[in-house]
Amino acid sequence: MNEYKSWKILQIIPAQGGWKAVHCRESKNKQIDISNRPIICWALVEPAGETAVVRTQVRGIEQQSDDLAVVEDLIDKEEVGIDGVDRNQYFLGYNDPDSHRESDHWIKQANDRLRREKEKRLKKRN
């Protein structure tokens, strides 16, 4: 889980067309939902906040609804709903326009990530 709520943008760099941020979440029927969001630009950022340890990172800036946001996991809830569905959205990686990664690659990444998140929640309960 990402512990930072906000980022301080130090520098913005144009992104080559075709880069995408790939996210996954579990749908209501427990299927994997993968979304690709275009990278608008790259940013040199550092986490902001009281608990943040200053370390710069390069992160994509993506369109989210009607706003631009630094690419990261979107953790809305710690727990899974009564129906057993994890409604959190997890960042899987960047899809390079020259790499031509197939959807099978991202589905495997999503399965692995969702499994790891479920294991983390189980460890917390015990």
Image (cartoon, rainbow, N blue to C red):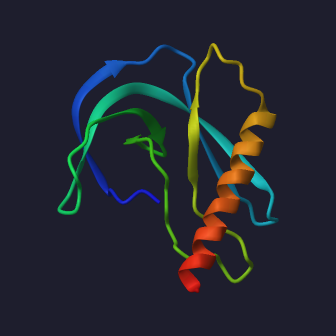
The residue depicted at 54 percent of the width and 79 percent of the height is: 124
From the top left corner, tell me how far across and down residue 112 is, in percent: 70, 52
In the rendered image, the vertical position of residue 40 relative to residue 3, given as above or below: above
In the rendered image, the vertical position of residue 66 relative to residue 101, given as above or below: below
Q: Which of the image's four quarters has the C terminus?
A: bottom right
From the top left corner, tell me how far across and down residue 12 is, in percent: 28, 24
The residue depicted at 25 percent of the width and 42 percent of the height is: 55
In the rendered image, the vertical position of residue 94 relative to residue 2, given as above or below: above
The residue depicted at 58 percent of the width and 69 percent of the height is: 120
From the top left corner, tell me how far across and down residue 33 is, in percent: 73, 50
Left or right: residue 91 versus residue 45 is right
Q: Residue furthest bottom?
A: 126
In the rendered image, the vertical position of residue 1 relative to residue 96, given as above or below: below
From the top left corner, tell me how far across and down residue 43 is, in percent: 32, 29
* Residue 23 found in image quarter: top right
Q: Residue furthest left?
A: 50
Nearest to the observer: residue 40 or residue 75? 75
* Residue 41 found in image quarter: top left
The residue depicted at 81 percent of the width and 57 percent of the height is: 31
Left or right: residue 109 versus residue 2 is right
